Image (cartoon, helix red, strand yellow):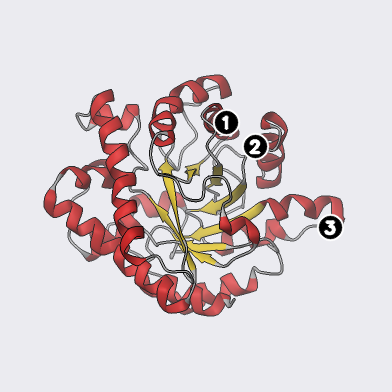
């Protein structure tokens, strides 16, 4: 049963962490094969489930040490119809795997949550297509219809919220929000950005946030940025005047990449670029003035417990 769906504690200004780069950690540090970069396939396998539990356990213990809240993102980023079909999962199998993904987060919460470390279960949604390329774009209506099945499944679980990560064009974001609204699920939208600070579609981040808010009556509970290095977007957060700055207060979460490389360079890389955990932590600290509402911090591709520990320490309380 959902614990925080009606009152997400990270909205009250509490400091929360999230995990790092799940897929890159499993592939490069643990030697786990993930077909099509899909971690959800591990839920079906006893050994894979143990790998996932051990991965999340490390972050749950970190949250406890630092007396921080933790947003538990289910390993379901790829568990939608198109990616599922490519991996041999039909609609019924996908619904089961999405429920089980949230169930795994329940197990982590039941074992590690404390009064000083509340744990919010976030049901993770990913893009229909490639997270880096805005090529086959849907209308907002098409996107709402496409994502409705996965979000409807999550609505019947203990998930406290839905988070859509690595979205690269605004129509898909609007569709996800509308699908979540239809099922009374709190929803968070996380855009990915290129090295110029724009979405892969070419749209500026500020415009994407404003357009999504306008089309959904301010539907997202907050926004995040993920799968981009701070050097890619720091400059777009420097605004002039109160009216221009207002959009930055909608950003409450950040999950940056370890690497400064572009998406194209990361796609072509054969080795993991781990960056510098301490530098990344310092950059997060430096972003606090630009993102006054920032409350949820974690990592994305190339990051692991070292990066999130450094972020957590540098970010302060």
**Disc with the residue nearer the chain's start (1 vs 2):** 1
Which quadrant of the figure contains the C terminus? bottom right
**Left or right relative to 24: residue 221:** right
Where does label 3 land, which residue? 240
Where does label 2 land, which residue? 219
Asked if labels 2 and 1 touch by Cβ distance under 8 angstroms, the answer is yes
Q: Tell me the element at label 1.
A: helix
Q: Tell me the element at label 2.
A: loop
Spatial CA distance of label 1 from label 2 is 7 Å
**Disc with the residue nearer the chain's start (3 vs 2):** 2
Front-lying residue, 192 or 251? 251
**Left or right relative to 171: residue 99:** left
Front-lying residue, 170 or 155? 155
268 over 90 or under it: above or below: below
Percent across and percent down for residue 177 are 57, 33
162 over 306 or under it: above or below: above
Where does label 1 land, which residue? 181
**Disc with the residue nearer the chain's start (1 vs 3):** 1
Q: Choose top left, top right, bottom left or bottom right for residue 155.
A: top left
Front-lying residue, 218 or 304? 218
Percent across and percent down for residue 307 are 42, 72
**Residue depicted at 55% across the width and 49% down the height:** 193
**Left or right relative to 229: residue 249:** right
Percent across and percent down for residue 284 are 57, 70
**Residue depicted at 47% across the width and 50% down the height:** 3
For the question of whether residue 230 can be seen, the reply is: yes
For the question of whether residue 38 can be seen, the reply is: no
Percent across and percent down for residue 119 are 44, 60
């Amino acid at each position: 049963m959902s614990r925080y769906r009606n009152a997400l504690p990270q909205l009250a200004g509490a400091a929360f962490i999230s995990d790092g780069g799940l897929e890159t950690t499993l592939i490069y540090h643990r030697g786990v094969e993930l077909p099509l970069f899909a971690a959800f396939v591990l839920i079906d396998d006893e050994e894979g489930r143990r790998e996932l539990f051990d991965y999340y356990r490390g972050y749950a213990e970190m949250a406890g040490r630092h007396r921080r809240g933790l947003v538990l993102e289910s390993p379901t980023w790829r568990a939608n119809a198109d990616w599922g079909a490519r991996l041999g999962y039909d609609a019924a199998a996908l619904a089961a795997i999405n429920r089980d993904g949230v169930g795994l987060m329940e197990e982590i919460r039941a074992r590690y949550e404390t009064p000083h470390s509340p744990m919010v279960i976030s049901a993770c949604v990913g893009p229909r297509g490639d997270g880096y390329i805005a090529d086959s774009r849907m209308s907002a209506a098409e996107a709402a219809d496409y994502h409705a099945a996965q979000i409807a499944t999550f609505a019947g679980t203990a998930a406290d919220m839905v988070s859509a990560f690595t979205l690269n064009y605004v129509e898909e974001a609007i569709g996800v929000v509308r699908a979540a609204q239809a099922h009374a699920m709190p929803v968070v939208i996380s855009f990915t950005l290129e090295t110029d600070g724009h979405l892969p579609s070419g749209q500026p981040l500020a415009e994407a946030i404003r357009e999504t808010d306008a089309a959904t009556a301010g539907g997202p509970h907050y926004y995040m940025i993920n799968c981009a290095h701070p050097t890619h977007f720091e400059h777009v957060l420097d605004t002039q005047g109160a009216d221009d700055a207002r959009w930055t207060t909608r950003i409450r979460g950040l999950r940056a990449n370890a690497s400064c490389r572009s998406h194209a360079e990361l796609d072509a890389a054969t080795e993991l670029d781990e960056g510098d955990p301490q530098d990344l932590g310092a950059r997060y600290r430096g972003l606090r003035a630009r993102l006054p509402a920032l409350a949820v911090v974690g990592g994305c591709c190339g990051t692991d417990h070292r990066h999130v520990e450094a972020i957590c320490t540098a970010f302060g309380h």
